[in-house]
Amino acid sequence: MTLQEPRPDIEPKPRPEPLPDPVPLTGCPYKANPYPLYERMREAGPVHRVLFPSGVQAWLVTGYEAAHSALNDDRLGKNHDRGNDRWRSRASIMPEPQHSQLQVHLLHQDAPKHTRMRRFVTDAFTPRRIEQLRPRFQQLADALVDALPETGPADLVATIAARFPLQVLAEVIGLPQELADRFDRDWGKVVQPVGPTDPGRPRYEARLHGLQSYIAEVVDHKREHWEDDLLSRLVVARDRRELSPEELDSMIFQLLVAGQEPVTNQITTALIALFRHPDQLTRLRDNPDLLPRAVEELLRYDSAFELTTWRFFDQDNDLHGTEVPAGDSVIVSLCAANRDPRRFPDPDTLDLDRTPNPHLAFGHGVHFCPGAALARTELQIALGTLLTRLPGLQPAIRDEDIEWIPAVLGRGTNHLPVDYDPRL
């Protein structure tokens, strides 16, 4: 085989600048639009060393095939005990004793413990049960829209996106109304830990203590007022010693935090994507039957779960041609995988007719999100209700003024001001 001389009439493609090592995942431009950086990383290879704002270094998996493989790789464990001292010294993980009391939930467990704990929650989130509850969810969404001002402006996060998922979650897991009304959304920020010397550390620890007290109150209430719901069954399992006290509190913690904040963020990312594509917004509003497929594409296009949580090898291992030391953190970029052109044609195009659409927004493998059916239904109802009942819906803020949340693993915004004509 011989190499051909380059044709003189074709301008050679400029060679991209080499990526730094580690690649910094920091700054407002990155949070506002990480996709150009992810494209460069995918083109350079499937695995890269990255640097997070806390100073922790990790190995980021970017390509679709590599991500799919890593999510199903049984060599990679989720338990924090696998992390080495180098990772632990910088990870700013939740302090003790809260880490041992709240961080032994499903996301941080491996088989067989993960298998044992997961079986307690799966029945509450089956697609069949969620579909049976759809009329109730629609009532909740309509009530929130009824409470909006007759015309815009309004902040859709404060009025809809941050309230609807909590109300739905309460229905699904059996959280009493009086307790749901007292849940402080600020507690959800405990999954954005800060280092011991950070000025925000006292407020962070106050959130932890407040959330722990709230969980204790939920457990006491369910023990005194048993009903046939998920929270009651978890408390009974603890009393039968099928769950430890720490496992019970951790699972309630995971339900309360992971069960609503990602949906809040996904509503905002979906709306922003539609605002940036007004023709698609109009099409979706005029064709509500398109909602299920559109939601899948919106999940792929800009997922609220940008990165997965930590994974670790228990010994030095090869990961797609990169040697990763034991105990170093491995993270999968779901957003980067979902924009891989080798799996999705025209990946940067929002195509509401895209099919098939095997996105990884809910992960894959044994840690696939158990609440995926619920999240899909919530997104369909929230988007469908807003587009149908708020004619002329449009952003009341410039695109460059959107303040993306600084969370390491997630995407979304805490405020989304909109205008609309008189609501229907």
Image: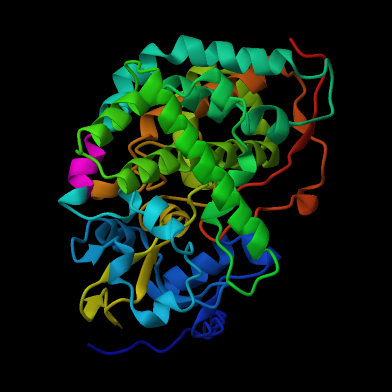
Is 406 on the left-hand or right-hand side of 169?
Answer: right
Q: Position of residue 257 (x, y in %)?
A: 49, 42
Q: Quadrant of residue 127?
A: top left
Is residue 28 depicted above or below 225 in this figure? Answer: below
- Comparing 424 with 76, the one in front is 76
Is 315 on the left-hand or right-hand side of 288?
Answer: left
Colour mapping: rainbow
Is residue 76 depicted above or below 131 in this figure? Answer: below
Give me the residue at 34% from left, 20% from top: 229
Q: Position of residue 424 (x, y in %)?
A: 74, 9
Find the magenta span and give its range: 114-120
Is 220 on the left-hand or right-hand side of 23?
Answer: left
Q: Position of residue 249 (x, y in %)?
A: 39, 43
Q: Quadrant of residue 393?
A: top right
Is any part of residue 353 visible from this angle? no
Tally of numbered discs: 0
Give me the residue at 37% from left, 29% from top: 373
Q: Position of residue 24 (x, y in %)?
A: 56, 76
Is residue 158 depicted above or below 32 in this figure? Answer: above
Q: Quadrant of residue 296?
A: top left
Give me the residue at 41% from left, 89% from top: 5
Q: Quadrant of the N terminus?
A: bottom left
Is residue 327 depicted above or below 363 in this figure? Answer: below
Outermost residue toward the left in this view: 112
Main SS class of the magenta portion in the image: helix
Is any part of residue 197 visible from this angle? yes
Magenta stretch contains residue 12 = no
Magenta stretch contains residue 115 = yes
